[in-house]
């Protein structure tokens, strides 16, 4: 009787909360970064159950303005295939919110020792003060379309992987060309479920994106590396940009004549606050996940690739940090580089830990065993999928000797000393100049024009490169990173660059580095700019950095060519395996891996239990910032004006009552499914109103890109009330507050 009464009481509570828009009984949703075009068919019932009040048409429509028209993909390039972060339009004048760490590079590029806006913050008090950012673009999705049938229509079972790829590529090019409408749109076709489905994405890409505001680093990066990926968190991780267009509203490069974007849709902001169980959804551009990874791939990740990356980045961070701490100028120059390296250094440490703790390898083995048993029950199934796992296992076995050599080149060489990659950008010059020497007449004149264009492009890039380049630091990176590569990779798998080291320098990496940086034009801005003024083939042929860059690149390409066929077999096996898994579970709705396309995820505002007898609340407060303050630690410095505002309880309309005191909510949690690329994504309530900006995941669920863990997986977001409080009270930028549509 007591059990029956309890069940009835819970049902009453459940339906009462559904009617009032709050689901008190929270069932963690299945993992999923979902395509918005399928929201009505796949997700809408679940979203309603959790509290959503919008219609499918209000979420995603290609005929009318909808929520999708406010979500922006940020990229460094005018024809992006992927997006490093997400932003959201929050006003009828193209104002855009994203994370501080997404805008970090651009804030840093505008910073000088005399005007260090990275440290001190920046607030444009007028449109005229908003700062252009060459290369930064913002893309809005026009539409997405399932083109699977068209892409795959000419394929036959007899085709090998090369023929299949060529046939697919030909059809994709044709679809993209037609959809772009002669360059009006930026279009791409992405593969889903490892080549089982294909979707067209049509974007409008804007090239004039200006910096409008950023909090001081003591707010935007509060907690630094210590708090990165951790909860509780107190970081005001936001920055503000604005999209500009030509006077007619079309995308255009930066011009003083450009005007703020008039968007189809922008997000209303809610400062009503959040409660446990409230509906939450996130839209954005997640970069990549590997949820269908097999046990062999997990084993390789755990034992080889990620430990190697952590080791290499650990050394790189140590070298940079020493010089950054010794000189404020170098600290500013390398701040963004250090942050970028550190972010995924810590991520991989957490992922290794999470994969082991959650027994992901064993779980993958169990799934594979179930697949084999299911397949063995039907000869037809075995005929279709019988080779899937064998192809994956065999191809990974053949690729194994190349895994670490490739990883070390990517991490220790390409992302080690900057001079090598910088020299590689000029690797086409020798061949071009050799052709000029042999050419005559019109051909020679045409080649000289191409050379001049290349030199002008390098000159523009050089200004940005050398602005944040310190030769002594880079020289240390060269010596120590290449030594690590030399010691950890067997002789037969190393690039030939070390032959001269062994012969001429007797294995002394410091002497080698000293000589290379003394002689190379790429190691010094004056030498490089002088070369551009008077280019010489003889100089290029003798340049040690260009020789190293060329040899490493050629070796890298050789390694990849040797595993090329094995990689194709692995891809075929994965395609068959995923197709088989979906057929094996006909009642399950499978979510595709992230691939930098617009997705939505949804769930609830929710706390969690990270370990036995440990409970984490769902939100943090400004009081926690004050508790963490440490004037001796640059990661935990608190701005004096912020302390004054806190002590005076001068929170304006953004304060709230919590734990018997007036405070400001800084960050909160939701059980939504995000990954890299979602940084800056809008977190919205049941009405589609902005309540926060997603910026991180939690340490206990770092395995999430490979294995989603619903009981632990949490998104960390900065509360929109903290964002507005910082803009208005700390920044004094009332014009931006006035521009927003705020619901109280």
Image (tube, grey):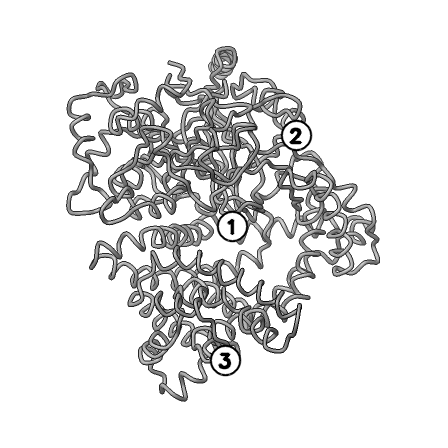
Q: Residue 511, image x and y in percent? A: 32, 80
The answer to whether marks 2 and 1 mark residues whose Cβ atoms lie closer than 8 Å is no
Left or right relative to 412: residue 200:
right
Mark nearer the N terminus (1 vs 3)? 1
Distance (Cα) linking label 2 and label 1? 30 Å
Number of the front mark, 1 or 3: 3
Q: Residue 690, image x and y in percent? A: 44, 24
Q: Residues within 10 Å of mark 3 (few under 14, many from 20)?
A: some
Left or right relative to 663: residue 42:
right
Left or right relative to 270: residue 71:
right
Number of the front mark, 3 or 2: 3
Q: Residue 279, image x and y in percent? A: 48, 22
The answer to whether marks 1 and 3 mark residues whose Cβ atoms lie closer than 8 Å is no
Distance (Cα) linking label 1 and label 3? 39 Å
Q: Residues within 10 Å of mark 1 (few under 14, many from 20)?
A: many
Which label sits on residue 496?
Answer: 3
Up the image or down, 227 lies above or below 547; here it is above
Q: For numbered disc 1, what is the local secondary structure? A: helix
User: Residue at the location (61% across, 38% down)?
Assistant: 591
* Quarter of the C terminus within the rendering: top left
Mark nearer the N terminus (2 vs 1)? 2
User: Residue at the location (19% across, 21% down)?
Assistant: 649
Mark 1, residue position: 360
Number of the front mark, 2 or 1: 2
Up the image or down, 198 lies above or below 550; here it is above
Instruction: Residue 394: tell me if it is visible.
Output: no
Instruction: Residue 50: tell me if it is visible.
Output: yes
Quadrant position of residue 147:
top right
Distance (Cα) linking label 3 and label 2? 52 Å
Quadrant position of residue 627:
top left
Mark 2, residue position: 38
User: Residue at the location (15% across, 47% down)?
Assistant: 632
């Amino acid at each position: 009787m007591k059990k029956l009464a309890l069940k009835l009481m819970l049902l009453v509570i459940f339906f009462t909360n559904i009617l009032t828009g709050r689901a008190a009984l929270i069932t963690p949703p299945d993992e999923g970064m979902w395509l918005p075009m399928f929201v009505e068919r796949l997700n809408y019932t679940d979203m309603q159950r959790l509290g959503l009040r919008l219609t499918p048409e209000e979420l995603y429509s290609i005929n009318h303005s909808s929520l999708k028209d406010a979500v922006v993909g940020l990229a460094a390039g005018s024809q992006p295939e992927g997006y490093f972060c997400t932003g959201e339009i929050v006003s009828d004048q193209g104002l855009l919110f994203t994370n501080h760490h997404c805008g970090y590079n651009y804030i840093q590029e505008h910073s000088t020792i005399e005007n260090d806006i990275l440290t001190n913050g920046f607030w444009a008090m007028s449109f005229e003060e908003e700062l252009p950012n060459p290369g930064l673009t913002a893309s809005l999705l026009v539409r997405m379309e399932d083109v699977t049938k068209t892409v795959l229509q000419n394929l036959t079972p007899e085709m090998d992987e090369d023929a299949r790829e060529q046939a697919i590529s030909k059809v994709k090019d044709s679809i993209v060309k037609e959809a772009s409408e002669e360059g009006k749109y930026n279009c791409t076709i992405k593969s889903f479920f490892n080549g089982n489905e294909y979707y067209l994405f049509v974007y409008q890409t804007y090239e004039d994106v200006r910096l409008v505001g950023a909090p001081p680093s003591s707010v935007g990066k509060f907690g630094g590396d210590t708090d990165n990926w951790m909860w509780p968190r107190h970081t005001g991780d936001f920055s503000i940009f604005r999209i500009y267009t030509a006077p007619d509203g079309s995308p255009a490069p930066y011009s003083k004549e450009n005007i703020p974007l008039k968007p189809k849709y922008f997000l209303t902001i809610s400062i009503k606050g959040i409660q446990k169980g409230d509906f939450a959804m996130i839209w954005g551009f997640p970069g990549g996940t590997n949820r269908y990874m097999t046990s062999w791939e997990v084993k390789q990740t755990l034992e080889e690739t990620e430990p190697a990356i952590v080791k290499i980045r650990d050394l790189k961070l140590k070298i940079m940090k020493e010089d950054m701490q010794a000189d404020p100028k170098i600290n500013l120059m390398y701040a963004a580089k250090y942050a970028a390296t550190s972010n995924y250094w810590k991520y991989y440490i957490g992922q290794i830990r999470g994969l082991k703790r959650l027994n992901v390898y064993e779980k993958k083995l169990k799934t594979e065993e179930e697949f084999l048993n299911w397949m063995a029950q039907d000869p037809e199934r075995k005929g279709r999928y019988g080779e899937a796992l064998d192809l994956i296992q065999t191809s990974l076995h053949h690729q194994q000797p190349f895994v670490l050599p490739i990883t070390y080149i990517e991490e220790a060489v390409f992302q080690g000393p900057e001079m090598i990659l910088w020299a590689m950008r000029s690797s086409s010059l020798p061949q071009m100049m050799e052709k000029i020497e042999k050419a005559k007449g019109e051909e020679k004149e045409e080649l000289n024009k191409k050379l001049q264009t290349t030199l002008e492009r390098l000159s523009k890039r050089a200004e940005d490169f050398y602005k944040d380049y310190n030769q002594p630091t880079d020289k240390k990176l060269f010596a120590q990173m290449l030594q690590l590569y030399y010691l950890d990779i067997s002789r037969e798998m190393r690039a030939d660059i070390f032959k001269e080291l062994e012969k001429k320098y007797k294995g002394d990496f410091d002497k080698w580095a000293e000589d290379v940086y003394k002689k190379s034009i790429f190691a010094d801005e004056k030498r490089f700019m002088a070369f551009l003024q008077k280019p010489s083939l003889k100089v290029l042929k003798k340049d040690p950095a260009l020789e190293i860059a060329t040899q490493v690149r050629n070796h890298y390409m050789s390694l990849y060519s040797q595993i090329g066929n094995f990689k194709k077999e692995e891809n075929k096996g994965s395609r068959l395996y995923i197709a088989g898994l979906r057929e094996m579970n006909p009642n399950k709705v499978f979510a595709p891996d992230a691939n930098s396309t617009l997705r939505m995820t949804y769930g609830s505002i929710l706390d969690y239990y990270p370990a036995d007898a440990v409970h984490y609340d769902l939100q943090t407060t400004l009081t926690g910032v004050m508790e963490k303050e440490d004037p001796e630690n640059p990661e935990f410095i608190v701005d004096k004006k912020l302390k004054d505002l806190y002590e005076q309880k001068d929170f304006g309309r953004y304060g709230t009552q919590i734990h018997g005191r007036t405070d400001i909510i800084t960050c909160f949690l939701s059980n939504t499914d995000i990954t890299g690329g979602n940084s800056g994504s809008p977190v919205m309530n049941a009405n589609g109103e902005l309540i926060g900006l997603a910026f991180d995941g939690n340490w206990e669920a770092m395995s999430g890109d490979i294995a989603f863990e619903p009981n632990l997986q949490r998104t960390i977001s900065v509360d929109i009330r903290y964002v507005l409080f910082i803009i208005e009270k700390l920044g004094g930028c009332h014009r931006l507050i006035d521009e927003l549509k705020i619901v109280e």
